Image: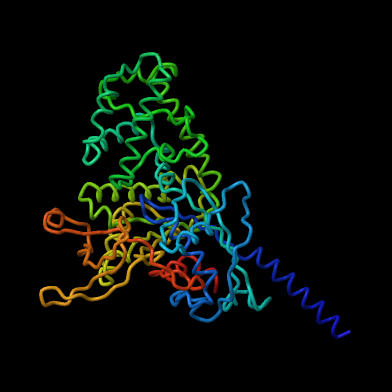
């Protein structure tokens, strides 16, 4: 009888714990996105790898649940949304564990993966119901270009066209966009819409966007689906472009332009893109996110110069406008977003020497918090970190002209040759004109390190601090 009562009590306790798990916040939707070449796929791969290999000396000292010995285990479980592609963790790990490892292929659309994290609660009500608790972490991966599309919802076709024209008139875009600008400015905006002409010019504009992103390393790419079309490839909804000569258009004639005119069809397709692509994405996915991390590569813009860095600054401004929760903000009018934590991470910290990490964090902090002061962020906690999801280098000292110089050592990505170098000084503040004239930053892309033990977690820099900020408050 005592045994029966014990089993019954145990069952009731388990049922109560399960019910409480559903009531108390034991589920986190984490959105991960990144600006151009920020290493988003590598970051997500590392985040998963650190969690599921924690008992293999994963070095997560700043993740309280691990530091306090309350972490039990984590594993991948079936994702909740069967219609969304699964993040290819196994494929990414396979590339990193090759004899000559390579970086995982970047994802071109949205994907998901779910992790179940078992731990011992310390302070929450759960400790009164069960010795163990489970936090379900849903990670959603989506391109940074989709996040940068959100401001389009607050713009007319005319406003967006003028903004794009200003960008195309600035270096480094200007020298590559002159032919396209000339072709658009020769058009009669009120001529009958020509489907082939729209298709040809939109493809030319798309090629420019690809070049800006992949060759110049620029961050502001709009519309984002032009370079990552997915199932929309060749659809008319992606066959428009900014009209670059609004100063010569009569305002009344423009307002009355029919959809079968050139300017009318460009406007109609822009509006359709906003409604069916941008708004749809945020209504289907963005609304359910609890936490957001935005990855930014600050080193490539420092390498490429003042124009590239200014573009990164503009991209971060656009992102912060999207998270502005003031009365006139985009999100407050369109959605009821529940994101309460936003982390900006400067990636590739392993590509500079360790004493430069603080400067890298400070630089990103300046990029983020200057525009933040002008906006309203109710109930949104923000943080900046310098990180390396997967550490590709080792640090050391080298002798140069009789002095000891900090260096990093790794294998160059382009030719697989070993390299030891001092990459330069990262500014701790937004660079002024003097910095660009007198400093030379030598940022080199490195290949992943060879893994000697596949059972060990991936080497990283500050992934434990990432986990603490994003999940620590949920695992008390």
Vertical comparison of 191 with 462: above or below: above
- For this view, does 175 lie left or right of residue 471? left
Q: Nearer the viewer, residue 243 or 125?
A: 243
Tell which of 299 and 166 is nearer to you: 299
Most foreground residue, 267 or 236: 236
414 is higher (above) or lower (below) than 24? above
* Point 29% across, 73% down: residue: 395
Relative side of 475 to 313, left or right: right
Q: In the current view of this chain or complex, which residue is farthest to the top?
A: 192
Please report the residue visible at 25 percent of the width from the left and 51 percent of the height from the top: 309
Residue in the image at 30% along x and 46% along y: 218
User: Residue 380: horizontal and vertical position, in percent?
Assistant: 44, 59
Quadrant of image for the C terminus = bottom right
Between residue 335 and residue 137, name the one nearer to us.
137
Write down the quadrant of residue 104 in the picture.
bottom left
Q: Quadrant of the N terminus?
A: bottom right
Residue 62 location, quadrant: bottom left
Q: Residue furthest bottom?
A: 2
Across the whole image, how many numbered discs are drawn on residues? 0
Q: Examine the image and state in which quarter residue 409 appears.
A: bottom left
In the image, is 215 to the left or to the right of 107?
A: left
| Residue depicted at 38% across the width and 30% down the height | 203
């Amino acid at each position: 009888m005592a045994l029966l009562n014990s089993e019954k009590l145990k069952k009731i306790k388990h049922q109560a714990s399960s019910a409480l798990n559903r009531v108390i916040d034991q589920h986190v939707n984490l959105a991960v996105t990144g600006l151009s070449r920020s290493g988003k796929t590598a970051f997500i791969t590392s985040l998963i790898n650190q969690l599921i290999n924690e008992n293999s000396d994963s070095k997560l000292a700043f993740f309280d649940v691990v530091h306090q010995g309350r972490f039990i285990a984590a594993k991948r479980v079936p994702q909740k949304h069967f219609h969304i592609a699964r993040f290819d963790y196994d494929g990414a790990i396979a590339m990193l564990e090759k004899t000559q490892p390579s970086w995982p292929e970047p994802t071109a659309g949205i994907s998901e993966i779910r992790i179940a994290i078992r731990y011992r609660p310390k302070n929450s009500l759960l400790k009164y119901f069960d010795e163990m608790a489970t936090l379900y972490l849903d990670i959603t991966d989506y391109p940074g270009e989709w996040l940068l599309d959100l401001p389009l919802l607050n713009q007319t076709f005319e406003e967006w066209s003028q903004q794009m024209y200003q960008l195309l008139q600035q270096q480094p875009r200007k020298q590559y966009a002159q032919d396209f600008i000339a072709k658009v400015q020769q058009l009669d905006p009120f001529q009958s819409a020509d489907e082939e002409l729209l298709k040809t010019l939109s493809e030319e504009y798309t090629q420019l966007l690809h070049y800006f992103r992949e060759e110049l390393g620029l961050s502001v790419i709009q519309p984002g689906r032009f370079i990552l079309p997915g199932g929309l490839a060749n659809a008319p909804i992606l066959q428009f472009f900014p009209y670059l000569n609004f100063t010569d258009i009569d305002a009344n004639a423009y307002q009355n332009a029919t959809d079968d005119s050139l300017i009318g069809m460009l406007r109609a397709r822009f509006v359709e893109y906003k409604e069916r692509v941008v708004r749809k994405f945020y209504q289907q996915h963005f609304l359910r996110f609890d936490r957001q991390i935005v990855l930014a590569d600050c080193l490539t813009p420092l390498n490429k110069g003042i124009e590239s860095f200014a573009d990164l600054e503009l991209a971060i401004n656009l992102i912060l406008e999207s998270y502005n929760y003031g009365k006139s903000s985009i999100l407050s009018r369109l959605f009821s977003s529940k994101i309460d934590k936003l982390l900006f991470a400067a990636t590739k910290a392993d590509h500079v020497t360790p004493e430069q990490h603080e400067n890298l964090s400070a630089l990103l902090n300046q990029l983020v918090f200057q525009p933040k002061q002008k906006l309203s962020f109710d109930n949104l906690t923000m943080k900046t970190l310098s990180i390396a999801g997967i550490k590709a280098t080792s640090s050391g000292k080298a002798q140069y002209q009789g002095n000891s110089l900090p260096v990093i050592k790794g294998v160059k990505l382009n030719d697989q040759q070993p390299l030891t170098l001092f990459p330069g000084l990262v500014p701790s503040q937004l660079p002024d004109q003097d910095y660009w004239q007198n400093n030379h930053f030598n940022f080199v892309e490195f290949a992943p390190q060879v893994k000697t033990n596949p059972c060990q977690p991936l080497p990283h820099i500050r992934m434990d601090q990432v986990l603490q900020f994003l999940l620590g408050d949920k695992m008390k």
